[in-house]
Image (cartoon, grey):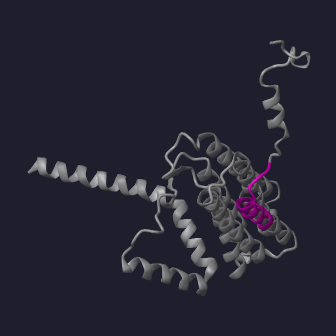
Amino acid sequence: MKTPMRLLGRKPDTVRTTEVAKKRTGIYLLPNLFTTGALFAGYYSIVAAINDRFEAAAIAVFIAMVLDGIDGRIARLTNTQSDFGAQYDSLADVVSFGLAPSIIIYEWSLFQLGKFGWLAAFVYTAAAALRLARFNSQSSDTDSTFFQGLPSPAAAAVVAATVWVGQSFSFLSLHGFAFLVMMITLCVALLMVSNLMYYSFKDFDLRGKVPFVAVLAVVMVFVLVSLEPASVLLILFGGYALSPLGARLKRIWFKGDQSSTARHLDGD
């Protein structure tokens, strides 16, 4: 059987390659809508800070944090994870949790320190970007139960809550308060790029059964947040940021107690 002349010299996979090329690529809409919402909230917080609306700016950061937490869960629940969504989420995080908090804290307080103020704000932004880059490069190799370094949303929450509390109680009028704000900003930045391990809450099963006391504790948290949201959020996220340091001090303390007890027994 003779081969038609029009097929001579044609590669076997040409037809298949042509069909694949004709397929239109797209993105999943639902999870990326939440990511876009988080990006919008972060951008809005920058605009609000420039216009001296610092409480609104701080609240917008928390809204971005909530939306950022939802998009990943929605993607996993609906099986719509994609490389595009992961990259888009990281870029949105740089804006919402890296750039936005640094501009808010600078416009609110750090501008009083001149060059040192904007340099401290830049260190925070750079630390957030480095933290996200490290997370993306290690996400497939590390234990998902813990994060290495303070997560950028939690760091942004500490900064936003600091601004919210300070604005509510007029702390800016206190002498030397801007220097304290700079130290908080730098400490949070260092925690993001540190090797401290933070619990990720990814293994927390919302469908599992919990004791009745746990439900009551959740109700009390909602009540406290409703009464004084800025202070309660600062305490919660500040405690989370310091939790690895507290755990390490606890281990050192108990190790010292065990050593002294052993020496005491040997002496007896």
Q: Residue 168: percent from the left, percent from the top? A: 70, 81
- Where 137 falls versus 209 (above or below)? above
Q: Residue at x 19, y 53 (%)?
A: 261
- Please state which of residues 261 and 132 is positioned toward the viewer in this rendering: 132
- Image-quadrant location for residue 9: top right
Is residue 184 something one can see in this rendering?
no
Magenta stretch: helix, strand or loop mostly: helix
State whether residue 153 is above or below residue 167. above
How many marks do you count on the picture? 0
Q: Which quadrant holds residue 233? A: bottom right
Report the residue at 81% width, 19% height from top: 11
Query: In this view, which residue lies farthest toward the right?
Result: 6
- Confirm whether the magenta stretch covers residue 32: yes
In the image, taking residue 116 as reference, residue 233 lies left or right, namely left
Which residue is depicted at the point 18% across and 48% down? 263
Q: Quadrant of residue 20?
A: top right
Is-magenta flag for residue 115? no
Q: From the viewer's side, name the closer residue of 258 and 90.
A: 90
